[in-house]
Amino acid sequence: MSYTTSRVSAMGEALRRTFGRPIEFGLLVASCATMLASLALIALTLWRTLPLEQPQWMRPQALVLAAGAQGEIDLAAVQTSLRRVTIVASADFLARDAALAELAQRKSLSAIGLTDLHPNPLPDAFLVRFVAGVAPEAVEAAVAELRKVKNVESVEYQPELYRRISRLSQLAGRVCWLLAAPLTAALIIGVALAASLWVRVDPDEVQVLNLLGADPSVMQRPYVYAGALSLFVAAALAWWMVAAASAWLEPLIGAAAQDYALRWEPAVLPIWAGALFCVGAALLGALLAWLAAQVAIRR
Amino acid sequence: MRTEPYLSDATVQAPLLSCEAVEKRYGEFRPALMGLDLTIGRGEFVLVQGPAGSGKSVLLRLLAGLEAPSSGAIRIAGEDLARMRPRALRHLRRSIGILPPGDSLLRRRSVVENVALAAWVAESTFEEGMRRARAALELVGLDVERYGGASCQRLASGQRQCVALARALVNRPALLLLDDPLTAFDEATAARIIDVLDQFSTAGVTVVAAVRAGAAGTVSSTVWPSRTRTLRLLDGKLAQ
């Protein structure tokens, strides 16, 4: 195999191109690494939070009070009827004795003698939870249905609260998509632009090699290697940034997620994921360089 | 690496180069070449003369297979260039020494590397390429010890022309296609270069050189070898 057609000489040429201008290389790698790190952080956040589940406190719920005293009605039949109503996810029984015992533990209530009441004046109740993400109108319609169930005394439901939470949740979701989609697109375009800057194909060289009868693969090889090498280095730096950012933010996010009952899986970044990320970036760099060289050769 | 033969046995006896009713058009403009019929044998020394814009450079590009004619056929050793696969065409180009207009050198590479590049592309090893490059540079009269390691951008135009010519000669080609080979040289250097080309031609290499007729700095026709066949191109047609 001759000098220019060998992979070793192509790699030597790629190294020379890559590290020949260290300041330019450093700036490009740093900018590309920042963009890759942002993309990786977005992907990592999605991976750790998806599927997005509304926490318990954001879901609509109603308290259904049963009519009459314990034993006078068939509570199991009421519970079954409640569960049959559309969009009801669950109907949990709250026994009147248990409710009174819970009240007895509250010092403020025992001070006014509420816990000494005999017999127990509290009714049996059911905590009805609705399916997450349904429209407030649908919940209100279901509440109306609940009120019609036999042996239901009353239904306590705060429609305004759920309407507000629902609107806020919709707004937050749309704002997130509105920001995330263009940001991701901008980052991808940024990576492509930065990569194309350092895989600039020298048209004179391509012209001369074409004149001499060089194979296109020989012409492309140094560019492909340089592209792969550059994005590999950028990806390694980006992974380090992601690991550092994760370590810094993890305790804060974990605590916030716990406070708001949000799903957040604490996880250590696995080495294989970093390796995969770097190899993927290298392949992307090679592909971009190959495309750039292909365009220059065809021109 | 496997090298495909680009010439079949049946075509070895054919004229080295032939053009049949070759025409080349660029858009709606006047054709650069019109109805060109030409046959050139092995070892011939052909001078294509004509004013600027007469189609000399286009003809050389077509002969080198760098462009395809709009109509007509160009054959090298009987093989129609239009029917050759791109890979075979590239292999063919490795056995043609081409001197394009200007010097087409890689400025950031050294003089020796520029010449050796042609040998490396033609599957020579690194050492063999360097050795042949040095020999070719000596042949065209460039001091290898002094200029061999220098970057091409530091050379004078005449020296760059020498490097480009050495690159055309380095693979011992069967066909030399030279576009304005002497423009950058003084009389003495031009005479030496013509002498080198004549030696190649005598050894069986076909030389086709395009020169501008009547241009300032053009070496007078008396210095060309006596057996030179001169063709005159005018407005894309061969003058009778």
Image (cartoon, helix red, strand yellow):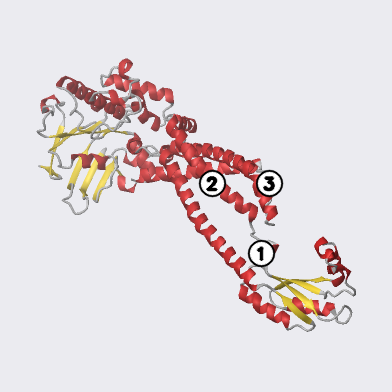
Q: Given the image, on which type of amino acid does mark 2 rest?
A: Ser
* Residue at left offset 70%, top offset 53%: A258
From the image, tell me which residue sits under label 1.
Answer: A58
Label 1: chain?
A
Q: Is residue A275 visible?
A: no
Residue B239: horizontal and vertical position, in percent?
Answer: 11, 42
Q: CA distance from mark 3 to mark 1?
A: 26 Å
Q: Which mark is residue B192?
A: none
Q: Which mark is residue A267?
A: 3
Taking the view exactly as shown, the residue that stands out farthest to the top is B145
Q: Given the image, on which type of amino acid does mark 1 rest?
A: Met
Question: With A129 as the anchor, is B40 left or right in this view?
Answer: left
From the image, tell me which residue sits under label 2.
Answer: A38
Categorize mark 2 by other alpha carbons within 10 Å: few (<14), some (14-19), many (20+): some
Judge depth for marks 3 and 1 and give the one in front.
1
Question: With B65 as the anchor, is A55 left or right in this view?
Answer: right
Quarter where residue B77 is shown: top left
Task: Please determine whether, in this image, residue B20 is positioned above or below residue A14.
Answer: below
Q: How many marks?
A: 3
